[in-house]
Amino acid sequence: MKNFKTAGIIFLIILIVAYKQINAQSQQQIFWPSLMNSPWPMSKHDPQGTGRSDFPGPKNPSIAWTKDMEYGIMSGPVIDSNEFLYFGTSTSLIFSDTLNYFYSLNNKGELLWTFYTFNGDPNSSGLLISADSTIYFCSLEYLYAIDLTGNLKWTYKTNSLQIHQWLTNIGREGNIYSVNFDGYLNCINNSGSLNWQKKYDSGFWTNSPVFSPDGETIYIAGTDSNLYALNLDGSLKWKFISDKASAIPAVDNQGNIYFVSKLDSTGLFSLNQDGTLRWSYNFANLNFSGPVFLSPTIDKEGNIIFPAPQPQKSKIISVDYYGNFNWEYVFEADDEAIFSPLICDSEGTIYCGSTWGYNFYAISNHGNLLWKLPLDGYQVDNSGAIGSDGTLYIGTHLGSLVTGQKRTLIAIRDTVTSVSGNEEMIKSFKLEQNYPNPFNASTVIKYSIPNGSPVVVKLIIYDILGNEIATLVNNEQFPGEYEVRFNPSNISSGIYFYKLTAGNYTDIKKLILLK
């Protein structure tokens, strides 16, 4: 009897420990009262810099529409509660008499309005939308505050050099935090006045800061590679002395801090809230001459995914909440580089674009390539944004002095053909044979969901041994006719199977890849 009680106590302890570990890894969006409640209200999605969407993104590269923004896009877009898009130009027009622009479009790609900035400097800084419907963005020496109809509210001009960063941030109290080229962190209130300006040691990188979950601590990387924790009045809370801190940290729900090492260092580092080292994950030395602004993303399971430039082929690496290796994805091109911040959707799919203009990538939560979209030399220097309907919006550019650019705003969503207006309503589930089959570069899989309530749909590719190769669909879908394009790039020729699961319905068909 005594042994039975002892075994029961041990089992209970194991359950409690396991529950705490699972619960610790759970990640959800943290309510932020000063930020607009919208699908993507700021660069990197949230003030903790997680880059994590609450919605599933596209599992195939079907382009819904493109827009020729002739001056290119470096930062954004962001999305408001009406699903309208906001972003600025990338091209520098300082050698002409032309002013630069900030735009608003609806989610169909139709232009709503244009805001003209004070000069030809590109609008290259991270932007956000506050809870009072104010849009904040930077155009080098100016911080602009405009309303949702494109009317100017105020501007703040730095007295030093230029504001230029991927991530402008907002505190819970509504103050805006931005770093200028002199390395000063500016705290500006929502009326456009400077609250304070701070600089420690040699100054801060221009691509921070982020916040702790409670909003009481600012984390920001220094140009000397130390990581700083500041109070809301700008006073120093602690400093993690290192040669490793990168430009944009990320903070999880439990307050743990993550940052990727810079040029002469080797890994991903996790700190506790008090600034002590929690763990580190090492990889090969970086191979770039100059600062590398690498920013991780955190999925809902607490996995940390980060870019790792290598001497040969660059990688995307995933580790779990405790720093243990999950998987890696290796890029094909020897000189591929992903310097823009990573983002992920609600299912753990990773989205990132090529700094050198090769491709835009979607990588599954198991490290498999779902799809890649050729960029034809157009560069990606931003995180992109995911709407509530799963549309992924990408901004690209050719360079800071190029005009007349094409297809610089791209909307990607999983293809859906509605049954609305059809004379014959869909009465049953149906999975069709992929076409073409056999295929080489890509093939299309069509399926139907009958009338009734929406169901959770999964469409997964398997090899002949039953190993999962790619997840094409994994989300709730309404009745209708759907088609998904499968673009395999890193698997060999052979026989594969695709399985559709929708509610209680399951069907499997064979496809043949010939390269």
Image: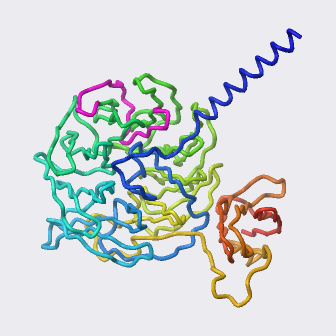
| Residue 181, x across and y down, in percent | 20, 45
For image coordinates 65% across by 49% down, the residue present is 366
Q: Residue furthest right?
A: 1
Query: Does residue 226 sit above or below 85 in this rendering?
Result: above
Decide which of 248, 289 is in the foreground and name it.
248
| Residue 442, x across and y down, in percent | 67, 72
Left or right of 94 on screen, residue 82 = right
Q: Magenta region: which residues?
A: 231-256
Query: Does residue 494 sit above or below 193 in this rendering?
Result: below
Q: Residue furthest bottom?
A: 423
The quadrant in which residue 377 appears is bottom left
Left or right of 452 on screen, residue 260 = left
| Residue 93 drawn in magenta | no
Q: Examine the residues drawn in magenta and state their main secondary structure.
A: loop
Decide which of 346, 459 is in the foreground and name it.
346
| Residue 483, x across and y down, in percent | 67, 74
For image coordinates 70% across by 90% down, the residue present is 423
Q: Residue furthest left?
A: 159
Decide which of 116, 296 is in the foreground and name it.
116
For image coordinates 71% across by 20% down, the residue present is 13
Query: Does residue 495 sit above or below 274 in this rendering?
Result: below
Which quadrant of the figure contains the N terminus? top right
Query: Does residue 457 sit above or below 442 in this rendering?
Result: above
| Residue 243 drawn in magenta | yes
